[in-house]
Each structure stands twice: as structure tokens, then as C-alpha cells.
Amino acid sequence: MKKLILTTTALALTAGMALADTVRLGTEGAYPPYNFINDAGQVDGFERELGDELCKRASLTCEWVTNEWDSIIPNLVSGNYDAIIAGMSITDERKEKIDFTQPYTLPDPSAYVALSADVDLTNAVIAAQANTIQASFVAAAGAQLVEFATADEALAAVVNGEADAVLADKASLVDQVTSNDQLVFLEKEELIGGGIGMGLRKSDAELRGQFDAAIQSMKDDGTLNALITKWEIGATF
Amino acid sequence: MFPYCTDPSTLEGLSWLSCYLTTSKHMMLFYSLGTVLLLLAITAPTALAFGFLGATSAKSHFAPLRWIGKTYIAIVRGVPDIAFFLFFVIALDQLFEWVRHEIKCPDWDQPIRQGNDFVVCAAAKLPLGDAPQWVHEVYGFSLAVLTFAIVFGAFAANVLFGAMRAVPHAQMETAYAYGMSKRQAFWRVLVPQMWVYALPGLSNLWMVLIKATPLLFLLGVEDIVYWARELGASKTPRFTDYPHPDWRMWYFLGLLVFYLLFTRLSEIVLEKIMRRLSHGQATAAGEAMRRADA
């Protein structure tokens, strides 16, 4: 009888392992070129291609889930998805709550965008997306900060005159500036953040190892650099 | 969608708009309209059931049941909706998973709370980790329905509680005089007559419920507000075939019209129900109808 119970538990456990094979990737879907929703309503962008390739290399079945940026970490730790791949910079503050893989981009300088090039940053109102490294940077610098739920709303605040400048990852701004004649980059750039990595639960060391190895293999054979160049994310490794 | 949509950059005016409004992404907006209507269709009767249970227990002669009913009404009515939605859904989800975990994985030796992480065994996950995306969506939606039902049920309970007291006491006494038991009098006299007193309060709740549906977004269900914001955000030519500046204002204007039309339609329907319920009632409206007929 005892043996029977043991075998069923073993079976149940292995069944549990088999179940865990689908990995749910959480992203924001509102941060081109890193991740966005394309015309077909699918997640697209640099991280979509990267994530699909990483899952292939780690032999995982992956599924994409979108979640708003504000609650992206709480929903990871409560288990609604298994990894964050959403242009999230690796910071000490976030490391207290979740673990990161090795970075898959080099630190991208953050740039200011404004309606004119001669904005005085010392007493300007600066817009940024809430819970980003840029928002904490502006707050720490003591400037006037207005926060928005999405990167697009932060930029729209500058166009509407609610804020004097917006601070965001440069790669996310380039396209907006080239397609809108009103907007210009300011000369000053800030080097903040330690590159972007995938975020995982602290209790999920095994999955983190798998993704770490997959990122390393993409770094080694140059495919990661090719992706970075294709999506104009910034400097290559 | 249409055959001429293959190269949107060559299109102008209305044909461009017709292609733009029928992209798969816009279909998701229209589909989410359906989600909202479905939520209302399921939540309203569920909340009413919760309200009925709450009201009957608050009126109960059995003290513990009465305490439960009164506590439910007091707590849920007293907590702000947003706080309730943010806290309660996560707590409810974790409660379900914890119960399943205790049943399915008795041999688990690790703690469930590891720092910030909430870890249960894979078999106890709700929905299961390998379930297709639609199962996750249905699960999220059901949690939303349950939360809405609990919140609005508490308000409905208070309305029904008041309505039960508004039924003239003479009616109940007459019922007892005819030899009906308490239970019979409750079901045959009190319940059929209370609706006319409850309807003004309930119709208020229905209107508030319609307008509260954007709270779905807080629960991770992609509703019309999410899609309006996402579709309205400015788009550059590199990432879409339909670039446009910030159009959120127009999308939100569309939502405004949708909600106004919907609440207007509800008003008309509720008016009809009220007329029907007033018929033959010992209320001012019922009396007026009787005179008009006579």
C-alpha cells in the first residue's frame, strides 16, 4: 500500500514537472522597438524575436502574455507568468524582489526629448514612465517629475505642453523623434541602468540558469548582435 | 479585411479609415466590447443572488447568520472599490492555489512564501502552467466576475434589505392570519412585492456597474479602455502600416458615446420594468395606474 502511494506521488510529481514545461513570458507590449503589439494584435519587436529564439535554444514552449508595466513585478512573484522580458533594466532595487539573467543589451543611454533644444533642464518639468530607472533618476536628481503609466503617455505630455522634456531609453525615442518634426533630442544624455535582463522569481533558479545559458549562446554566435542591429537597440556586444 | 487593404500607404480618406478600423488589432477592441457586455450579463444576476443572500441573512432570526450578513454588507460597502479590486483578487487567487496545494501536494517540503514569491507546486497552479492562453483568460475573467459580484452584491443586499422592510407590514400579518408559516409568507408575499421598492436602488447599481467595467483593466482583463489607450497611442511608420499621431482623445470619445448609449438604453428598459412591477401595487405609482385603467 505504502509503495502504491509512493509511486502515485512520484507520478504526480513527474506529471507536475511535465506541466511546468510551458513558460509564460510577461511583457508590456507598449515599448517599441523592445516590445509592442503589431497590427495583427500580436506581441512583436526585439524582445519577441529574442524570447522566441531563447525558448527554442532552451527547448521550452513559451507563451506570450501582456501585463501593464506598473504591476509587472507583483504579477511575476504571485505566479501569473514565469519571466519578465519587457525592456527591464537590471537595478539593485529590483534585485531585492526578483532575480535577473545576464543582460542581453548593453546599457543604453537615456535621452531627453523636448519641443525645443534650449530647454533648461535645471528647472524643467520632466516626464517619465512610472517605476522606471528614468523616473527614479529624475526624482533622485531633485528635478520636478511627472509620472505616466506608459512611455507613450509620457511623450504625449511633452507634445501637449504638460511637461518640458521626457526622459526615456534612447532607442525607444529615436523613431518618435524622426517621425514628429516638433520633437528634438537634447544634447545631454544620462548613463543610467546596467543593461536589460530577463526578470525571474528568486525561487526559480533553474529557469534562470536555462535562460542565462541561452543568452550566452546567442552572445557567442553573434545572433544577439544581429538582432540588436536589426531593431536598432543600441551598442552591440 | 478588404481586398484593397494590401498596401495601406497608398490609401486616402475613407478607404484608409475602413482598412484601419478593421485591422486585427481593432477587432480585439470590438471583441473586448463583447467581453464587457458578457461581464455585465453574468455579473448582474450573480450580484443580485449575492445581494439576496446577504439581505436574507441580515434579516435572519438566527444570530450568527445575521452577523455574517451584516458584516459582509458593512465591510464591502466600506472599502474603496479600487483597494478591494487590487487586494482581493490576488488574495482570492492565492487562496484557491493554497487550498489546491494542500490537497494535491501533501509531500511538498518547501515553504509557500519564499521572500516575495508565492510558490505552490506545479499541479496546484490555477490555471495549470501549460494551459492554453484562453484558459488563463477565462480564469481571470471569472475572478473578475466573482469580485464584481461580491462588491455589487453588498450594495444590492442593502437595497433589498430596505425593500423587504418597505413591504407594508399589514400584508405579512394578513398572510399569517391566513395560516401561512413564516417561510411561506416570506416567499409568497414578501419576495414578490419587494421588487417594486428595490428597483430604483437596483437600477442605480446597474448604472454604476456599467460605468465600473473599466475596472476590469485593473484585474488584467484587456477591456475596451486598455485597447482604446493602446490603439490611440501615437504610432510611427516603422512598427505599423497605419502610422498616426496621438489619437487617444478620439478613442475615449468613442467610449464615452458607447457608455452613454448603453446607459440610455438601460434607462428605457428599466422604466418598462418599473411600469410592469408597479401594476396592482399599493404604491402611489400602482394607484395611479389603477385609476388610469378605471
Image (tube, coloured by chain):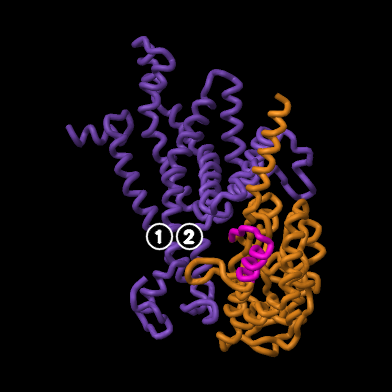
Chain colours: A orange, B purple
Badge 1 and badge 2 in a common chain: yes
- In front: label 1 or label 2: 2
Residue to which mark 2 is pinned: B224
What residue lies at 38% left-to-right and 76% top-to-bottom? B17
What residue lies at 45% left-to-right and 53% top-to-bottom? B35
Q: Along the line of sight, which residue is nearer the eye, B184 or A185? A: A185
Label 2 SS: helix
Q: Along the line of sight, which residue is nearer the eye, A99 or A122? A: A99
Which quadrant of the figure has residue A99?
Answer: bottom right
Q: Quarter of the image for the C terminus of chain A: give it.
A: bottom right
List x then y, in percent, for residue A63.
Answer: 59, 59
Say above or below: A14 vs B23. above
Which quadrant of the figure has residue A81?
Answer: bottom right
What residue lies at 26% left-to-right and 35% top-to-bottom? B288
User: In the shown orientation, is residue B77 left or right of residue A195?
Assistant: left
Give the residues in magenta: A47-65
